Image (spheres, rainbow, N blue to C red):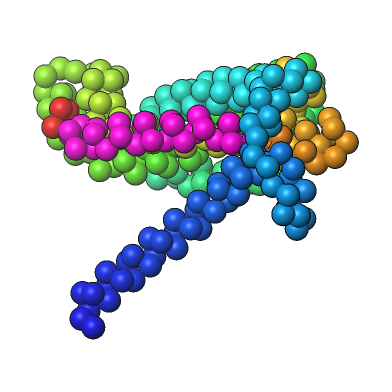
Amino acid sequence: MSEKLIKRVLLAAGIVFMLIFCLTPFIYMIVVSVSGNPSFLSGSVDFSATLANYRDVITVKSLRFLTYLKNSIVIGGIVAVTVGGIAALSAYAVSRIEFRGRVWVPLAVLAFSMFPQISIVGYLYKLMRAAGLINTYPALILPYIAWTAPLAFYILLSYMMQIPRDFDDAAFVDGAGRFTIFRKIIVPVAMPGIVSAMLLVFIAAFNEFLFALMLTSDHKARTIPVGIALFEGLHGEVPWGYIMAASAIATFPLVVMSLYFQKFVIQDVTRGALKG
């Protein structure tokens, strides 16, 4: 067997393994969500397919699933847009402007981002309670911005460091200022990185559990992960069909966004520099 054939076989085997590894939990979730008798999980062969779980999750008002979904989308969207703007400006400043302590900024951001959530959630709760923000959107938006900003900052810093400074120099010669250069030159060229960072921030905020659990008390600001986790409390048992149906519906927007923006990012990677 030739070396080239061995490489192809190993590559194909790796692809198949990764597909099985990634898709098995999703397939399992779908199977349970359409099961009319989730007791088959305990060994029973009595399996009947139904869409009743999806219908109930959407229509039963006591579950408040659509409210949780709306909260997650609104909070995640606000956080993604805000962090994208802050991180883009910060990364541009660190990558382009010479100032004292410039080298220490990325290290400081990294150091602060290493604190685990559990170490600050108690103090954060006291702060939000004193400010009267418990169970409101700002109670989650503000911590999420601080929590995800380092991730977006590092993505955009590495991206902007690769953009040639010749763009800036040429714009300076034409009389453009820093903000004009950032807005009209750097942002279009760095748009793939900005979109990628915003997408990752949105997914992180959408899926976050600990802050959402501690800083909300009911459906007014509670997000999808906590809402689904509390399905057990609403029914007195573990309603696996509802949980998996809700998880499948909540996963759908993330999959659609990832597929859509992946195409957008790939297109901008191939043409962004030329347009700049």
Farthest right residue in view = 236
Q: In the picture, residue 218 is in which quadrant? A: top right
Q: In the picture, residue 123 is in which quadrant? A: top right
Please give the name of the residue rendered at 66% of the width and 25% of the height, measured from the top-left corner.
55
Q: Is residue 91 above or below residue 56?
A: below
Residues 190 and 47: in front is 47
| Res. 119 in view | no
Please give the name of the residue rendered at 77% of the width and 33% of the height, measured from the top-left corner.
231
Q: Is residue 172 left or right of residue 226?
A: left
Residues 86 and 43: in front is 43
Please give the name of the residue rendered at 80% of the width and 41% of the height, measured from the top-left corner.
238
Q: Is residue 168 left or right of residue 214?
A: left
Q: Is residue 266 left or right of residue 13?
A: left
Residue 271 forms part of the magenta stretch: yes
Residue 12 forms part of the magenta stretch: no
Looking at the picture, how far across and down is residue 125, in whole percent?
Answer: 77, 30
Q: Which residues are magenta?
A: 245-273
Please give the name of the residue rendered at 23% of the width and 34% of the height, measured from the top-left corner.
267
Q: Is residue 143 above or below residue 33?
A: above
Q: Quadrant of the N terminus?
A: bottom left
Looking at the picture, how far across and down is residue 199, in whole percent?
Answer: 44, 33
